Image (tube, rainbow, N blue to C red):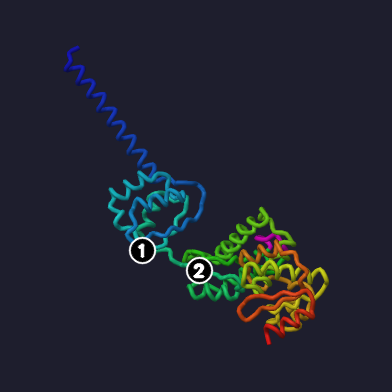
Amino acid sequence: MSKLKTLLIANLILSFIVFAFIIFTIFKFNSFLNSKASNVHKRIVIRIKKNQSPRSIIKTLKEKGVISRSDWFYYYLKFTGLAPKIKAGLHMFYTDLTPKEVAKELISSNVYATKITIIPGLTAKKIALILKKKGFNSDAFLDIVDNKTIAKKLTGLNITSLEGFLFPDTYLIAKDEKMEQVVCILFSNYLKHLTKIKNSQKITKDDYKKLIIASIIQKEATDKNDMAVVASVIYNRLKKNMPLQMDSTKIYPDNSSFNTYTHKGLPPQPICNPGFDAIFAAYNPKKTNYLYFISKKDGSMVFSKTFRQHNINIRKYLK
């Protein structure tokens, strides 16, 4: 066989290999574009900054599990001309989207931008007002919060409301999110933080008691260090069968079981939605013999063991 013929055959084989490789690559690339990164349906919210580079955006998408290959996704955006069309702002993705669907969300003008901030100590009604200002159905929210069936389903307890379980935080909520899902998002955040305290998401009657105590702590103390001491006062008074007499419950009528001046023991449910520090204090009270406290005008607190000393502190700091 001549050298020319051998060279021709070699070129044909090489061309076939290259052609086969190209076909295989196209097939794999097309499969990538139409395949989900995961079968798990998990919501991911990403903030895209103005003039942020496509590579930086893609890196974040890969780290969050939204896409499986950053290199191929970059080539897709570049060759289709979509890269310059990416919109800055907050975008919502799911881990079971295809790369084509991810790209569609990146260039969407309907940017996910509903930011809800809930500070510690708000009641469900006040949270509802915040949601209403953002365009959500506040009545539906309260109906779900006070739905006994839903409360039992989520907590496993025979309670009538999810008051107390609506964890204070900053949330990014989809504009068309159903209110039941919004409540579940807040409740799930409570479970997440509960795990940090007791290493379990199982809610017991004792956990609910501590949540009620945490709600009172949240209303009575502003400083993190004072919260553990306020917790000790509450436990000490309960142990001695004394009325709690917490000023935060004076807003309730005398005949209300929430009023701790006229009724012994804890209120029947949390009086607000406490933050992590107050909940942590309810589980970790400081060991003291204090039975009384007052809040000074500057927000600092003074604690005492006897009623006599308590009255002295009142005259000294409040009159």
Range drawn in magenta: 152-157
Query: Which image quadrant for residue 52?
Result: bottom left
Please name the residue shown 75% across and 64% down the image. 287
The secondary structure that most of the magenta stretch takes on is helix
Q: Residue 109 carries which label?
A: 1
Please name the residue shown 31% across and 32% down the image. 21
Magenta segment: does it hold 190?
Answer: no
Given this view, does label 1 or label 2 mark the residue nearer the observer? 2
Q: Which mark is residue 116?
A: 2
- The correct choice, above or below, for 183 with respect to 55 in the image is below
Q: Nearer the viewer, residue 171 or 138?
A: 171
> Which amino acid type corresponds to the residue marked 1 in the rendered image?
Ser
**Position of the C terminus by quadrant:** bottom right
Residue 247 position, x and y percent, is 70, 79
Residue 122 position, x and y percent, is 60, 73
Residue 191 position, x and y percent, is 62, 58
